[in-house]
Amino acid sequence: MKQTIDALSALAQETRLTIFRALVRAHSPEGGKGGLAAGEIADRLGVAPATLSFHLKELAHAGLVTSRREGRSIIYKADLDRMSGVMGFLLEDCCNGACGTVAACAPQEECVS
């Protein structure tokens, strides 16, 4: 529960949510690929480097962002496995277990209220 609270707290701020969404758009399923350099994030979002650094640190602390070094750049990537875990935690008791899985609860299903 604490990990989910940390993740939701990190995303409950406009700049961090915008950063995370930009990283999701830049995601690649191939390990070691995808993501954005800090300077590119700052340019795209119009965020000062010091401010961006603070927000990236908060997202990393919550486990939502990973980083890797490529030459002189640090590339940030959304941790979709972690976000999937957060979503799974939030939806694990969907329909009080009547659906069997969250995937079974499509909007047209009777078990969704």
Image: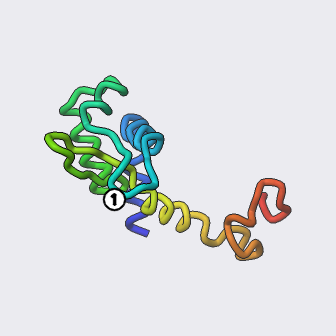
Determine which residue is flagged by label 1.
63
The local crowd at label 1, few if under 14, some if 14 to 19, many if 20 or more residues have their Cα within 10 Å, is: many
Nearest the viewer among 107 and 93 is 107
Whether residue 28 sits left or right of residue 48 in the image: it is: right
Which residue does the image show at 48% across and 65% down from the upper left? 85
Residue 113: give x, y in percent of width and height: 78, 58
**Above-or-below relation of 84 to 93:** above
Nearest the viewer among 94 and 104 is 104
Extreme residue in the left direction: 72
Residue 72 position by quadrant = top left
Residue 87 position by quadrant = bottom right
Which residue does the image show at 38% across and 65% down from the upper left? 3
Amino acid type at image mark 1: Gly
Nearest the viewer among 12 and 25 is 25
Whether residue 46 sits left or right of residue 88 in the image: it is: left
Secondary structure found at label 1: loop
Quadrant in which the N terminus is drawn = bottom left
**Above-or-below relation of 76 to 4:** above
